[in-house]
Amino acid sequence: MASGTLFLVKSVLDLIVGDPPSDAAQLLAWLASHRLSLALTNETLVFAALLLIPAVLALYRSLDGSHRPWAAFSCALLAAAVPIIVALAIIHGRLMYPVYGIDVNDPATVALVVSLYYGGAHEVALQLGVALIMLGLAMRRGTFGRTAPAFGVAAGALQIAGAYPWLTGSLLTSITQAMFAAWLVFVGTRLTRFPRAVTAAPRAGVGGPRLP
């Protein structure tokens, strides 16, 4: 739920920042006028990604991933997105934060950083889209309710549709991110309603009771 809230904040910040100009010379003016929003986006992205780690663990347990390869693979796709997002945040941070006094202020360098970030975000969106669709299908069995499968498939399809921000624009990109955020909050809410035994792993030993 916390991760979803932060991703929702990021979607609003991305809408404020808008689309970067394609002209390298104009990138410096775009960067200067949105430096604060870009910095807030960067910090929000890092914590939102790291908070996905316990979310994936909870999903894996609740979907009984150890006995359901489909659920395990979909959780693995979601987990694999975390280090990629963090790496993208490191790249993105070079736009605002100098290191050893080295500031990115050359138009060609800024263009490279921006293209790396948005190109990586494109890959992450596709990966999240596939993961959400698979998780939605995996949730047909379980206690997530009837809404969860449809929500997951719809959110995943929207991630794929919005994975091309240079074609669709920042508005659709922000909507797709907000949809992903809403899915995280929705799933987190459902997980809080589960009995503690549902999300707990068995104790060591054969047939042992579940952990509290």
Image (cartoon, rainbow, N blue to C red):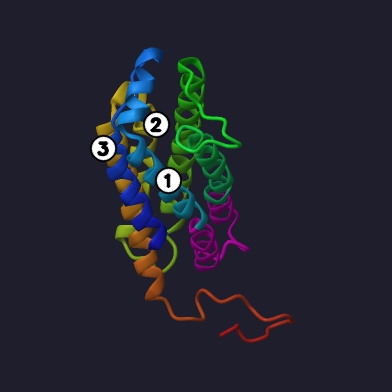
Earlier along the polypeptide chain: callout 2 or callout 1?
1
Q: SS for tag 2?
A: loop
* Residue 20 location, quadrant: top left
For the residues labelled 2 and 1, the Cα–Cα distance comes to 15 Å
Q: Of 190 and 124, which appears nearest the observer?
A: 124
Which contiguous range is marked in magenta?
A: 51-76
In the image, farthest residue toward the front: 101
Residue under pointer 1: 133
Residue 154 seen in the current view: no
Which amino acid type is marked by label 2?
Answer: Ala
Residue 138 vertical position relative to residue 190 in the rendered view, above or below: above
Residue 99 lies in the magenta stretch: no
Point out the image quarter for the N terminus.
Answer: bottom left
For the residues labelled 1 and 3, the Cα–Cα distance comes to 29 Å
Q: Of 82 and 63, which appears nearest the observer?
A: 82
Residue under pointer 2: 163
Earlier along the polypeptide chain: callout 3 or callout 2?
3
